[in-house]
Image (tube, rainbow, N blue to C red):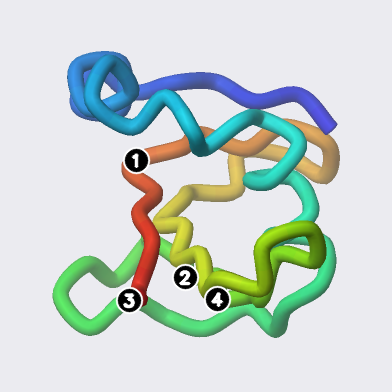
Amino acid sequence: MELIESRHWERKRVKRKNITNEFIVYAIQNSNEMRDKYWEDALNAISRIPPSGRLLKVVYKRISKDKVKIITAFWLD
């Protein structure tokens, strides 16, 4: 899966260094596609990441089958 980073995520990534691309891909692959509350074309993925057991939320847009644009990602707990 190819990840494309939005400008927002590039700025936020500096502060959230513990969220790696592997965690983001894992969350997208292992959760249901849920529509975002505010944006019609954005999707949400919420998944528990195995090494730490923490919940990760990823907001993304699906560009094609194997391309995903990451808008933001953050820990819920």
Q: Quadrant of the N terminus?
A: top right
Q: Earlier in the sequence, mark 2 or mark 1?
A: 2
Residue type highlighted by circle 4 = Ile
Tell me the distance, in whole angstroms, between the alpha carbons under discs 4 and 3. Answer: 12 Å
Q: Earlier in the sequence, mark 4 or mark 1?
A: 4
In this rendering, position of residue 58 left or right of residue 67: left
Residue type highlighted by circle 3 = Asp
Query: Residue at the location (60% across, 48% down)?
Result: 62
Q: Is residue 27 above or below residue 68?
A: below
Q: Earlier in the sequence, mark 3 or mark 2?
A: 3
Tell me the distance, in whole angstroms, between the alpha carbons under discs 4 and 1. Answer: 14 Å
Q: Give 32 or 23, whichever is nearer the viewer.
A: 23
Question: Most extreme residue toward the front, as rendered?
Answer: 52
Residue type highlighted by circle 2 = Asn
Query: Residue at the location (40% across, 57% down)?
Result: 59
Image spot of residue 41 (x, y percent):
37, 62
Pair 2/4: label in front: 4
For residue 71, the mark is 1
**Residue at label 2?**
44
In this rendering, position of residue 2 left or right of residue 52: right
Image spot of residue 47 (x, y percent):
64, 75
Q: Give 59 or 27, whichever is nearer the viewer.
A: 27
Callout 4: SS: strand
